[in-house]
Amino acid sequence: MANKRLQATLYSAPDPWLYRKKMKILEDIILEDSIEIKSKPEVVFNFITSLVDNESYCKWHPKDHISLQWIKGNPWEEDSVVVAKEYVHGVKHTFKFIVTSVKENQLIEYKPKSKFLRIFIPLNSFNFDSTPDGCVFTARGSYRIGRLGKLFAKKFIDKGIESMKLHLKEEGQNLKKIIETGNL
């Protein structure tokens, strides 16, 4: 009889393997910064799509942007590839992105060219939303952080997230200043 009770207990308990399959290994983090710009979405979109070389790219964020080179396709067209060098949290980084979607005056989406990096940075975007007074420009980055990384490198990861938030905010503020002062 005792054996039957034990069997019933074993079978009624949920299978731990099912829990492991449902547990996410990577945590999604969306960083986003929006700013209202007193100009039409077309003007803001045209500024972003005019970023085609080092000079134009560095003008947008002189403190952090280093260089921009389009290595495949025409700038800001779907499937075009760009290499951007910039400082993030004081460290020089080189990013290679592929443009995945362009909706004129509305949206640009891009992601890392490396399929491996897409695991951790699945998608970035610029949105251009019309308002009665102009445009809301939103820069968005989606990131995936490993649970073990957060556990063992929390301070480092938190510093990186804060640096990216600041970078997005500065880009938005710089864009607003350039567009609204006519300093194109």
Image (cartoon, rainbow, N blue to C red):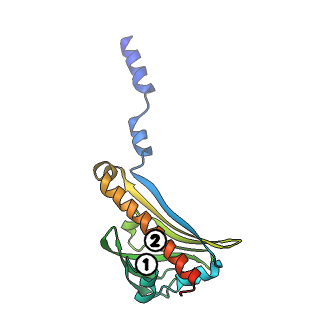
Which quadrant of the figure has residue 118? bottom left
User: In the image, is residue 35 above or below residue 52?
Assistant: above
User: Label for residue 61?
Assistant: 1
Mark with earlier residue (2, 1): 1
Residue 175 seen in the current view = yes
Label 1 is placed on what type of residue?
His
171, above or below 55, in the image: above
Instruction: Confirm whether residue 77 shows in the render.
Output: no
Residue 42, percent from left and from top: 63, 81
92 or 152: nearer the eye? 92
Residue 139 x %, y %: 52, 69
Which quadrant is home to the C terminus?
bottom right
Picture disc at residue 136: none
Nearest to the observer: residue 119 or residue 109: 109
Residue sitting farthest toward the top? 1
Q: Are marks 2 and 1 in contact (CB under 8 Å)?
A: yes
